[in-house]
Image (spheres, grey):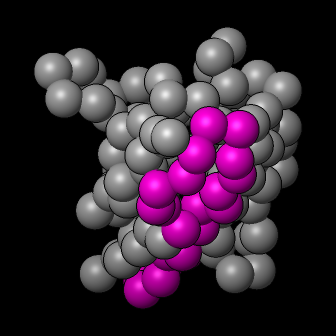
Amino acid sequence: QVQVVESGGGLVQPGGSLRLSCATSGSIFRIYNMGWYRQVPGNQRELVASIPRGGSPKYADSVKGRFTLSRDDVKNTVYLEMNNLKPDDTGIYYCNAIIMVTSTANPGDFWGQGTQVTVSS
């Protein structure tokens, strides 16, 4: 079993900051890509930022220069630092991780339950 648990969402005023955390645990052999997606009602889930194992993060154009993604491979955790937040950043943020649960298993797609981020005055 693999658990993906997000934390750090909340209500913030425009221009404010939030830090999201996503901790993975359980039967994990290796974690490949980790990232955050955002979904608003009526829209598809969209990629906000992702980072491959040993690589550099990539960002959606809308968050470049404001969001910073990092990962800690000792703690199996990924962080999303969000600064200068805008109302358009509002949505449910989902953590995603591509994980091999054993050395012989195919990588699987694992999701967290989502955390709400609301940017409003």
Q: Is residue 95 visible?
A: no
Give the extent of the magenta segment. Answer: 8-32
Image quadrant where residue 83 sits: top right
- The residue drawn where x is 41% and y is 73% is 5
Quadrant of the rendered image containing residue 37: top left
Decide if residue 10 is in sight here.
Answer: yes
Question: In the displayed structure, does residue 10 sit left or right of residue 49?
Answer: left
Residue 85 painted magenta = no
Above or below residue 105? Residue 46 is: above
Up the image or down, 58 lies above or below 11; here it is above
Q: Main secondary structure of the magenta part?
A: strand
Q: Residue furthest top?
A: 61
Q: Quadrant of the N terminus?
A: bottom left
At 41% from the left and 25% from the top, the residue drawn is 46
Magenta stretch holds residue 19: yes
Residue at (63% x, 17% y) in the render: 62
**Taking 81 as reference, is 43 left or right?**
left
Q: Nearer the viewer, residue 85 or 77?
A: 85
Which x, y percent locates residue 55? 83, 42
* Image position of 69 with respect to 89: above or below: below
Instruction: Where is residue 47? Give x, y as percent.
Output: 49, 28
Q: Residue furthest left?
A: 42
